[in-house]
Amino acid sequence: MASFRDVRWSDAVPAAPARTALIAKHLCGSGVDEVLRQLEAQDCLPRIFVLAPCCFHKCSLDTYINPEFVSALLGLSAADAFHRLMRLTDWNASVHQRLQGTAPSASVSKKSVRHFVSCPEGIAASVEAVVTYGRVQWLQRRGYAVRLVEYVPNCVTPKNRCLVAYRP
């Protein structure tokens, strides 16, 4: 099976990039970053992006699109430090999961980090916001206007924001 990197997009999409849109949901981990990097390398950045990232805990510094931003903001330049930071995003569980009883229990072992941290969802959302903002900056430097759009209610999933970027 071919991966995204194996496609020559100028051949696969007959329209000029200025007349195209790319819509992708569930771009796991650094999938957003790989898509952006590949399209830019092939001079095929479309006019419009709608990208719904997820699985932030699978991001890595070597594939993240804007490591300079993370390094400047947080002082993280080591891949292992970035990896530990990304693991914090896996704490999110939807309200729906909690109501259905399928999310991790509120009563956790005293050996668990959840025992010591009272707001893991807030920490996860903050880390995701940092990663997302680095992507927003990357797109803005390439002439895109960018908005974050909530596409489902938070009670369905806290991973509910997509990047909508367009070149005016």
Image: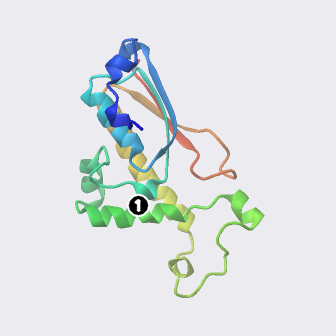
Measured along the vertical axis of the image, is residue 168 above or below residue 158? Answer: above
Relative horizontal placement of residue 25, taking residue 101 as reference (left or right): left
Vertical comparison of 147 with 26: above or below: above
Q: Tell me residue 20's x, y (percent).
A: 44, 17
Q: Position of residue 34 (x, y in %)?
A: 34, 40
What is the count of numbered marks? 1
- Position of 125 with respect to 155 (left or right) is left
Circle 1 SS class = helix
* 2, 104: nearer the viewer: 2
The residue positioned 32% from the left and 33% from the top of the image is 6
Going by the numbered disc 1, the residue's amino acid type is Met
The part of the image, by quadrant, that contains residue 13 is top left
Image check: 114 left or right of 143? right
Please identify the quadrant where the N terminus is shown: top left
Q: Position of residue 144 (x, y in %)?
A: 37, 27
Hey, which residue is sitting farthest bottom in the picture? 110
**11 w.r.t. 42: above or below:** above
In the current view of this chain or complex, which residue is farthest to the right? 100
Quadrant containing the C terminus in the rendered view: top left
Image coords of residue 71 (percent x, y)? 25, 55
Figure check: 72 above or below 107: above
The scheme the figure's colours follow is rainbow
Q: Is 106 on the left-hand or right-hand side of 75? A: right
Seen at 56% across and 88% down, the residue is 110
**Residue 42 falls in which quadrant of the image?**
top left
Tell me what residue is drawn at x 44 percent, y 32 percent.
146
Residue at 62 percent across and 81 percent down: it is 108
- Residue position marked by numbered label 1 in the rendering: 86
Q: Residues within 10 Å of mark 1 (few under 14, many from 20)?
A: many
Instruction: Using the rendered view, name the quadrant where residue 151 is placed.
Output: top right
